[in-house]
Amino acid sequence: MKAVQANFLGFIQNRAQFIIPIYQRTYSWTIEQCEQLWNDIVRVATHNEYLAHFIGSIVYIQKGIYQTSQIPQLMVIDGQQRIVTMSLLLCAIKKYLQNHPDNNAPSSQKILNYYLINPEENSDLRYKVILTQTDRETIKNIVDDVQAEISNKSLHITENYAYFLRMLEKQTINIDDLFQGIRKLIIVDISLDGNYDNPQLIFESLNSTGLELSQADLIRNYILMGLEPDVQTRLYNTYWYPMEQDFGQVGYTEWFDSFMRDYLTMKSTSGSIPRINEVYLEFKKYFSTKANNAMEDVISDIFTYSQHYTRFVLGKEPDEDIRKILKDILTLRVDVAYPLLLEFYDEYKKDKLTKQDLIDLLTLIESYVYRRLICGIPTNSLNKTFATFSRNIDRDNFVNSVKAKFTTLDSYRQFPTDEEFKQALMVRDVYNLRSRNYLLGKLENFDRKEQVNIDTYTIEHIMPQNENVSPQWQKDLGEQWKDIHTKYLHTIGNLTLTGYNPELSDRSFVEKRDMKGGFADSPIRLNDTLAKRQTWSEREIISRASELSELAVKVWPKLSVSTEEIKKYKSQFIEKETSSFTLESHTNNLNPASLELFEQLRHRILNLDSSIIEEIKKVYIAYKITTNFVDIEPYKNKLVLWLNMNFDEIYDPRGMCCDVSNIGHHGNGSVQVEISDINEMEDIMDLISQSYIKHRED
């Protein structure tokens, strides 16, 4: 490796071509980064005390298998964003000088010949910078000042070029002064020897902060970087480039890291769910388990599942019936179910499931998630539920096996019954749910061929929101009108859809019913029964809520699986830990003070969140969300706690904790702390809360 300080313009002026390898991400700087670069250049240009400005390093392979043409071709390992952005700025200056010549600045032709092209070369060798496929034609057209229409134009390149043109047209700085600022830019020129230096290790070191590249970019580089150029090109063109095109430029940025996390979750035999910022590390672990010749098998598999993924997250499913239910699941934002949906969809694409089978399973997922939401069951256990769900599924009897598996989910993972769902829906404040439009839309459009676009309607409170209701409303509601208003205002029985929300306003029920556009003059089915009501009181609200809840159990149907199927699979699905241990098993030997201490601590922990689960183990009592965040082992005169965190993660200003990462112990995690005095409770709860928050966010 050779590293030297260099002037950027001198560096780029050398007779060479900078090639961005196909495994690198596409150009991704936004206007925000361009604005920062512009401001830096203007600052050094207008202040003589700045003799130079460092813009970063450019790392490339100098020799070896990449040195194949008559002009030096340098494979850029790091620094693509800086080279391309500066090239766009120079292109903008060239364009500006064509229309505004300046004798003090270099001519537009010199800028082109010195910094943007190799003037004596033809074809692609003519260009100083050659980008990956998505960006290549866009920047070539900008360099050549050609207005040709190309498919899939690079958004970032065109937007940033336009930004620099706008800044030049504003003429806030003299063009000659601006160029003087560019002349002050310096870089660290780092050249690698392809025969000795390991580009992958150097690349990882340069990007160790994880800020520069997405996790998916790191994975792509890991897969392709070490291969021979012809193999790189073949795998990229066959698999990775089509994936990028399928996601699209915006979708790739927004969704690809999440896809890789869900793909790895699906592939995990233990149901392990990678953190989103550790997907690359988990992929390397996953790939290390594969045979040496499995690279193409892995990337081919990723490609297959990425096609499934775009069908439901980007709405690309061609079948209208399947696309509709996938859209509903996406609306619920139940992305924790995506690893399981990937498996369902793969079975469907392999013709192991019929279209109706897939629809039945997707409907089951939608019902499971939404019934639990309405019943107020915390959602933070769903990720582990879905990640491990298919572990024991009978692939030869897939649909019934999945349905039977749902019947074995217990406690906080259970599938709510019809009665539980109806009772919860009748009293739930659904108006303040994020999914309120989804709820009313599904009720309105159930079993209806002519679907109503509810986005053109607004939600109407039949009994008005105004707490100072009119005398007529007070009369209709009765003496307890205040209590009724408070209790039922936002419940399903009092909500409907209308296109006349401002006109209805706080009018009496009869006026809302009979006016033009009112309930009796509405195409909305949710208003059918309102048109027949004579008044609106507590009885009518409860009656309508009951009617809608009966409809809801059809919209979000219950499990339908035979008793024989349940019996067939129940024994292999039950994953309960059979244990005879009780709380008393651990607390019988505590002295009175320690028992009181334990009861208070237990109460405080459970009150952190209603979703926290208490599990009695042989040696300790565990408190968990989807995994343990604190374990307690009672002793006669004290309680020993283990916090499921690394020792360097805990904030412990009083020094109460000790590091047990290299010491055998019962509980989970590397942090141990003891409590024997009630006066230590607040400090202990602060430590426990740190572990709880960490696992809740994970």
Image (spheres, rainbow, N blue to C red):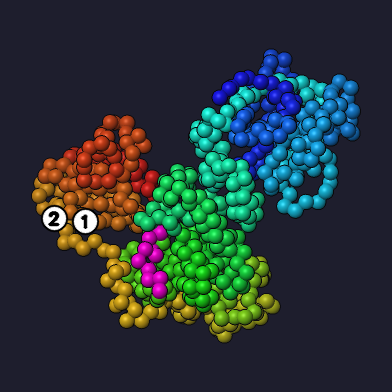
Q: Which segment is the magenta one?
A: 387-396
Q: Locate residue 554, reporting x and y percent.
A: 48, 79
Residue toward you, 619 or 264? 264
Q: Are marks 1 and 2 in contact (CB under 8 Å)?
A: yes
Q: Nearer the viewer, residue 84 or 508?
A: 84
Residue 55 seen: yes
Seen at 62% across and 29% down, the residue is 63
At a point 80% along the width and 34% down the height, the residue shown is 121
Q: Is residue 37 left or right of residue 464?
A: right
Q: Secondary structure at mark 1?
A: strand
Within 10 Å of disc 1 (Cα), the crowding (few <14, some 14-19, many 20+) is: many
Q: Is-magenta flag for residue 71?
A: no
Where does residue 246 sit, x and y in percent of width and height?
63, 57
Q: Is residue 549 among the parts visible in the rendering?
A: no
Tell me the quadrant of the picture where the N terminus can be found.
Answer: top right
Image point 53% across, 59% down: which residue? 305
71 versus 447 height, above or below: above
Q: Residue 110, relative to residue 313: is it above or below? A: above
Residue at image mark 1: 616
Residue type of the residue flagged with mark 2? Ser
18 relative to 683 in the view: left or right: right
Q: Main secondary structure of the magenta part?
A: helix
* Badge 2 element: helix
Report the side of 596 relative to 52 (left or right).
Answer: left
Residue 392 sits in which quadrant?
A: bottom left
Residue type (three-letter) at the residue carrying disc 1? Ile
Say which label, 1 or 2, has the lower sequence index: 2
Residue 196 lies, in percent from the top left, at 53, 29
**Mark 2 burial class by Cα count in 10 Å: few <14, some 14-19, many 20+:** some
Residue, far bottom: 532
- Residue at mark 2: 585
